[in-house]
């Protein structure tokens, strides 16, 4: 039994692997990141302007790096040297940003079903229902996006992204409109589903408590460079001391 | 007595031009908005050129291009069995080029006003360019589509220089209302000219009214 679990763990380690080595300049900003993300939940932490959102856009295929490679499970997504670039939507990767970006002219149901054109009508309806249940938003089924609160819209945006059953889920401060307990509750609903579907998640945040919320690997990004990486306790020790120092002095 | 032949010819010309223009301008505007690269600015400039070119200049160029003097004109004449100049089909070609900016510019403005986050979301969910245009840009910019259609239609109804240069004044084939009006004034038939002018003005007011009604939110403008 123990052996079986050990082998399974190794197999998973090797299967869930996002490798990137990218470089991009935009005006005065220079992003250069090289890392392997093997954890099922990675938090990219850093101050605003550190390049977190830029990094997610590169992973999602919304932007091309000036130089570099990105590979997921040994599938090359971007390789500027070889001229490989899988566009967004073709890399089993979804991005949920702080701005929920729901299509305002479509109902909540049609929004969640947007990426499911390949499914039959029945499958699509079932998937939409399942996803809205997952994010605790089944009551919103026939609502219009303009009638939703910020938090409700973010739940629907998350359901829409997960509905396509991606391999990689990119989250750009997606719980900003939810209060602390609601955001923690949503995370607790999400984690088992992601594990069951073998979805790797990368979440960007500038809030240290988000980084501690899951037992995630934390990548600390500063001015476009990877400053530290590892479990939250080590990668964020400096940040933790800063917060504790403030609490003590107050 | 109203010249119904000129009236229906004008409406046919404007309707044909509007349909062809929308079919051309929607993909062109989407390309200008979604595409990347500095050279797209040049395409946009060329598409806007008919706005500043005198209609007679445009009509003259087209007359030469489509006439028997150029290989292009001779080729088209051989293909159709008749030259394009001085025919209804020739007028449609001229009108499409002349009114192109009136269709492209509202569409570019409307498409560009759609939030880029929505386009990113659609892309990430696997939508290709055709679906982005059909499922996101067109429905969200439907007022711009209406504006483009009405402006193309009106601009074609009112065109004079291109029609005169390229089409001449052939009843039932190229004599539109604005040419008719010119003829009536030349013949000092001011009563008839008044009626023709009134028809043109009424057409414009009705069509523009349709745009503003469509763009006006129900219950009036928010203060």
Image (tube, coloured by chain):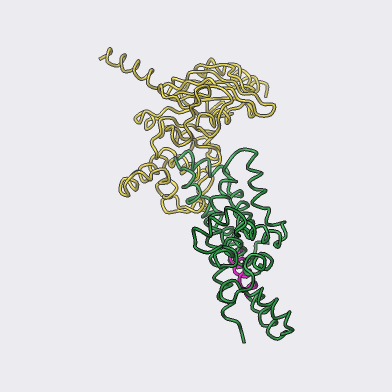
Chain colours: A yellow, B green
Image point (64%, 67%), residue name = B163
The span picked out in magenta is: B203-217
Q: Position of residue A115 (x, y in %)?
A: 42, 43
Magenta highlight on residue B216: yes
Q: With A134 as the anchor, is B59 left or right in this view? A: right
Q: Position of residue B62 (x, y in %)?
A: 64, 58
In this orientation, does residue A153 appear? yes
Image point (70%, 82%), residue name = B194
Q: Position of residue A30 (x, y in %)?
A: 64, 23
Tell which of A48 and B150 is nearer to you: B150
Tell which of B100 and B151 is nearer to you: B100
Q: Position of residue B24 (x, y in %)?
A: 54, 54
Q: Quadrant of residue A136?
A: top left
Above or below, A164 relative to A227: below
Which residue reaches farthest left? Answer: A1
Magenta stretch: dominant secondary structure: helix
Tell which of A171 and B85 is nearer to you: B85
In this orientation, does residue B219 appear? no
């Amino acid at each position: 039994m123990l052996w079986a679990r050990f082998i399974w763990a190794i197999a998973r380690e090797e299967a869930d692997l996002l490798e990137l080595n990218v470089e991009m300049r935009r005006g005065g900003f220079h992003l250069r990141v090289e890392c392997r993300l093997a954890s099922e939940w990675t938090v990219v932490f850093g101050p605003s302007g550190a390049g977190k959102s830029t990094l997610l856009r590169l992973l999602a295929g919304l932007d091309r790096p000036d130089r570099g490679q990105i590979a997921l499970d040994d599938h090359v997504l971007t390789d500027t040297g070889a001229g490989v670039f899988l566009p967004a939507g073709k890399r089993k990767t979804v991005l949920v940003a702080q701005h929920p970006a729901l299509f305002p002219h479509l109902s909540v149901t049609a929004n969640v079903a947007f990426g499911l054109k390949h499914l039959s009508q029945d499958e699509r309806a079932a998937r939409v229902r399942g996803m809205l249940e997952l994010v605790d938003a089944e009551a919103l089924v026939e609502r219009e996006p303009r009638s939703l609160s910020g938090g409700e819209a973010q739940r629907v945006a998350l359901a829409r992204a997960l509905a396509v059953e991606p391999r990689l889920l990119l989250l750009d401060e997606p719980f900003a409109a939810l209060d602390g307990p609601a955001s923690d509750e949503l995370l607790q609903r999400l984690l088992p589903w992601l594990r069951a579907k073998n979805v790797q998640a990368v979440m960007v945040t500038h809030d240290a408590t988000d980084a501690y919320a899951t037992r995630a690997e934390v990548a600390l990004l500063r001015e476009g460079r990877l400053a530290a990486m590892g479990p939250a306790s080590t990668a964020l020790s400096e940040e933790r001391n800063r917060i504790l120092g403030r609490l003590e002095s107050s | 007595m109203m010249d119904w032949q000129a009236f229906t010819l004008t409406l046919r010309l404007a309707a044909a031009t509007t349909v062809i223009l929308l079919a051309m301008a929607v993909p062109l505007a989407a390309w200008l908005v979604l595409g990347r690269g500095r050279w797209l600015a040049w395409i946009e400039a060329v598409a806007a050129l008919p706005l500043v070119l005198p209609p007679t200049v445009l009509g003259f160029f087209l007359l030469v291009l489509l006439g028997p003097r150029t290989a292009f004109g001779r080729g088209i004449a051989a293909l159709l069995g008749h030259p394009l100049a001085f025919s209804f089909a020739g007028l449609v070609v001229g009108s499409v080029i002349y009114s192109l900016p009136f269709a492209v510019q509202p569409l570019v403005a409307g498409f560009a006003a759609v939030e880029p986050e929505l386009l990113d979301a659609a892309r990430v969910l696997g939508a290709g360019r055709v679906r982005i245009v059909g499922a996101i840009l067109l429905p969200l910019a439907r007022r711009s589509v209406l504006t483009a259609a009405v402006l193309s239609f009106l601009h074609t109804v009112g065109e004079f220089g291109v029609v005169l240069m390229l089409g001449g004044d052939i009843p039932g084939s190229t004599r539109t209302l604005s040419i008719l009006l010119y003829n009536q004034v030349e013949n000092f038939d001011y009563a008839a000219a008044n009626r023709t002018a009134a028809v043109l003005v009424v057409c414009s007011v009705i069509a523009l009214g349709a745009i503003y009604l469509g763009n006006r939110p129900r219950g009036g403008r928010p203060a």
